[in-house]
Image (tube, helix red, strand yellow):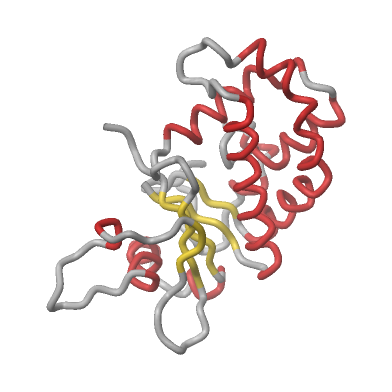
Amino acid sequence: MGLDLTLFMADWARLGAFPVAEQADALREAVWPRDPEEDRSPWEEELPDGWHWPPGPEPAWCAEYWFFGTSGAESFHSDAGRGWADMRPLVDPSVREDLDVFLGGLLWGADGARDPALGGGDGVFPPVDGERSGVLLVSAPGAVAERAAAWGRVGSRLEALRGAFAAECVGWACRPQVFEEFTALLGEWGDVAAEAARRGWGLVGLP
């Protein structure tokens, strides 16, 4: 059994107002408040994929995204990141540079010195010794805006990856095997980044 990825977008000021140790629970409890008389998980119900918002009349400060077709498994995302790491030397620089910005620290383990998502001082899951514990990804609003801008430039050019994908992913373990599934997953991340950037929010991925 591998990890699942639970992805949230959130108002950074609201999330940062919680003590660090309570931030993960604050996200989960905002979107899925527990009825003390019931002991049911939202994953036991037939709910649609896409965005899930906190119930009630108060303005929402966060939302959870359910990916289409990945069953929540983090392996789909880490496999895509490994695939990108392998294929990127074969990709035209004009496409590679924008995808590096978009995927770095999101699906692909970019150099921390180049990754705006790893900066500290924002009060949200702050890094300790350069690492964030208990989370799979954190992308502050500024980094999300950069990702969304990069996606806006490169999202329509993914066909340029087909040859590199065929050379470096198909037939290799722990890599995406179907080009259309790979690009569909990138497209979902693009939609997520665009929506969070539109609101000026950040992204958090919890296991």
Q: In percent of the image, x 61 and y 50: which residue is there?
A: 119
Seen from the viewer's position, the closer of residues 25 and 83 is: 83
Q: In percent of the image, x 66 and y 14: which residue is there?
A: 166
Residue 73 percent across, percent down from the top left: 39, 39
Q: Does residue 132 appear left or right of residue 112 in this picture?
A: left
Answer above or below: position of 171 versus 54.
Answer: above
Residue 66 percent across, percent down from the top left: 46, 54
From where the camera sits, is residue 16 visible?
A: no
Answer above or below: position of 40 versus 107.
Answer: below
Answer above or below: position of 23 versus 3.
Answer: below
Residue 25 percent across, percent down from the top left: 33, 65
From where the camera sits, is residue 67 visible?
A: yes
Q: Does residue 161 appear left or right of residue 24 in this picture?
A: right
Task: State which quarter of the image contains the N terminus.
Answer: top left
Q: Residue furthest bottom?
A: 57
Seen from the viewer's position, the closer of residues 15 and 79 is: 79
Residue 59 percent across, percent down from the top left: 52, 84
Q: Residue furthest right?
A: 94
Q: In percent of the image, x 49 and y 61: which residue is there?
A: 124
